[in-house]
Structures are given as structure tokens and as C-alpha cells.
Amino acid sequence: MAHNLNYNQQTDKYSFFSVKEKAWHSLGQIISDYPTSAEAIQFAGLNYTVEKRALFTFDNDNQNGKSDLIIPEIEVPEHYATIRTDTEQVLGVVGKDYQVVQNIDAFSFFDSIVGNKNGILYETAGALGKGERIFITAKLPDYIRVGKDDLIEQYLFLTTSHDSYGSITAAFTPVRIVCANTLNAALKNHSNCIKIKHTASAQDRLNQAHKLLGITNQLAAELEEVLNHWSTIRVTDLDVKRLVQIAMAPNKEVLQKLQNDHKDELSTAYNNVVSSVMEYAFSSPTQQEATTKGTLFGAYNAVTGYFQNVRNYKDDESKFKSIMYGTGLQRSQTAFDICDRFSRHGIGALNYLF
């Protein structure tokens, strides 16, 4: 199943919901209004609990009727299975210090960030595989404003697992309203996410929630200042192409060829990608606004917009992974860094990137 969404045979539903927008192969529940956290858990099929249970060995021969000897079960020390209690499915094997973070705790984490029911708006949530990994995206009430009319929404994304693979991860993700470009910009020395180990206490998680809100507020203020500055910097078509070529370079070898002006040695695949980004930069309706057309901000949006609106993915999950923590995120971050350097030192400063 390419989408990897959890399918619950007991309810005959996929574990996913989305507000208004269809996603993930149009599976799951599409609802018209923003739900409360309690409603979101139900809509997403996340209303199950997970338990740690002791692990035991058993005798294969005796189980198959090949032996008259009764060999007792032996408990596996300091290792446990995580079990989804509604389906009795094993989700993973964990150590003695592992603490289960129930799905309801993940939503409580988000609720505690804003602190009132009118603050955070749950956009999507769901479970993957057997239910071993869940994810939540929620919209914060404030916007980042670029110019007078260009608004960038502020989102939080959280994912956690019940199988011992990975920490609880919560990230700040601004998304531009008009074309849903995920920016994922880490500014200066800050990170746009926090990670919490499954050994952390409930109080530790609450403290981390307030830390994430602080990160979000600081990043939003810095990002608004940076992007407004970029929207005032004029760039030529040649500047945009240079920025795109460097941002989309998959490795140092390509960067070296660009520096040495060995354009005839660049691969067709790479040139096609650059052309696609450039076409989006100059022809997309969302790139014709005053804050984007012919500006450094527009050049940055061309890269992020390519991954959100142009690039072909084999399925929605691949797109989601690319934008949130894969190639799309990496190239977008590179584009952000390049534009930051350009804004301070001009096109000549890009030579130092090689």
C-alpha cells in the first residue's frame, strides 16, 4: 500500500482526517470545520491506547507437537512489546525505560502550546502502518505578513511513534496561503524543531511545549523581518537562474561545474529540474504579485513552490516526506541560505558557496 495509511478493519476506515482539502490518495475523512482535539482524535482514528507488555520465549517443537517435553516460557529481561490494545497488534519492541506517549498526549501537547480552545486549529492527523507512527498538523492563529497582502500561515507539525524508532518531534512550518509553499526556514542559529525522548516525563514534555512556542514566536518575528526585506530587493532573471542552479545542485561536483562554467557537462536531468523551477518562477500566477515578481523573495518562493506544486512524486507520502524532512526541505533550506547571503553581499558572494 503506497500511501501506508493505517486501515482499521474493525471500523472499515483509514486513520486520517483533513479539513476541507483532500490528501493521501483521497482516503480518510474530509471534514468541513476545524475540530477540537477530542474530535480530531476520533476523526483520525487515533482513539486507541498502547501498552507495554512483557516478552516471552516459547518452545517451537512443543508448539508443533514434535515433543512431549513441556518447556516453560522464559521472560525476555528488560524488553517489552508495545501493543495496540484495540487490535492487539504488536507495534514494536522497546526497552524498560521507554515510556509510551499515548495519542491523546500528543494532542494535549499541542493544546498546551496555545492554552485555549480558540488558539490552535487542527488541520490533519493520522496513523501509518499498523498505527505505530502518528502525525498531526495544526495551524496557529497568527500570520507572517510580507508586504500588505501576502500572508504566510504558521503551522506546527508533530510526529511520534510507538515502536522505539525516533523521538517525539515537533516542528514549526510556515506555509504561504496562496500556493501552499512550505518554507521550513531555520534562521540564524535557531532550529525550527524540538525532539523529546520517550523517556521524558509528562512535565518535561509540557516544558518542551512552551519551549516550542517560544521558538515559534521568535522564528515568526525573524522570518517576517527577513522576507519583507527580501521583497524589496530586486533581482534580474540571470540572478534568479544563478540562485536556482546553486540551490538545486545535488552535489559538490555539480557546483564545481557551475563554478568552472562547464555547463555542457551538466546532466539533462539536472538541467530539466532547473528549467522547471525557472518556468514556475516566471509563469506561476502566485509569482506575479508585487512582493514576489522580480524580487529575491520571489526567487526563494520559486524553489519552495517547485517542490510543493510542480515536482512529480510517486505518491502523496513521498511528497510529504520530501517537503517535511527530505530533499524538498534540504533544497529549500539551501535556497534560504543562498538568498540570505545574496541579500547581504550581492550575487558575487555566491562564489563562496562553491
Image (tube, grey):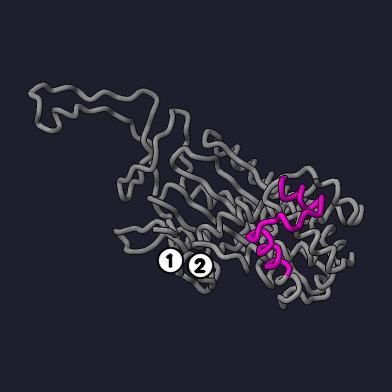
> Per the image, is 273 magenta?
yes
The residue under the point 65% across, 67% down is 180
Residue 141 in sight here = no
Distance CA(mark 2)–CA(mark 1)? 9 Å
The spot of residue 304 in percent (x, y) is 69, 62
**In the rendering, which numbered label is found on residue 28?**
1
Relative to residue 195, is residue 79 depicted above or below? Answer: above
Q: Circle 2 sits in a helix, a strand or a loop, which is it?
A: loop
From the viewer's side, name the closer residue of 346 and 10. Answer: 346
Residue 263 locus on image (x, y percent): 76, 57
Tell me the quarter of the picture where residue 312 sits: bottom right
Identify which residue is drawn at 72% across, 75% down: 286
Q: Position of residue 213 (x, y in %)?
A: 69, 50
Left or right? Give the position of 293 relative to 215. Answer: right
Please, what is the three-letter code of the amino acid marked with disc 1?
Answer: Gly
The front one of 146 and 279 is 279
Magenta segment's dominant SS is helix
Residue found 43% across the figure and 40% down from its top: 163
Q: Residue furthest left?
A: 68
Residue at image location 26% in from the left, 23% down from the top: 74
Image vertical order of residue 18 relative to residue 156, above or below: below
> For the residue carrying disc 2, how many other residues have a C-alpha within 10 Å: few (<14), some (14-19), or many (20+)?
some
Whether 50 is among the magenta residues is no
Per the image, label 1 sits on a secondary structure element best described as: loop
- State whether residue 20 is above or below residue 139: below
Instruction: Mark 2 or mark 1: name the one nearer the start of the chain.
Output: 2
Q: Is disc 2 in contact with disc 1, using a CB cutoff of under 8 Å? A: yes
- In depth, the one of 344 and 56 nearer the eye is 344
Does 97 sit above or below residue 317? Answer: above
**Type of amino acid under label 2:** Ala
Magenta residues? 253-278
Q: Which residue is mark 2?
A: 23
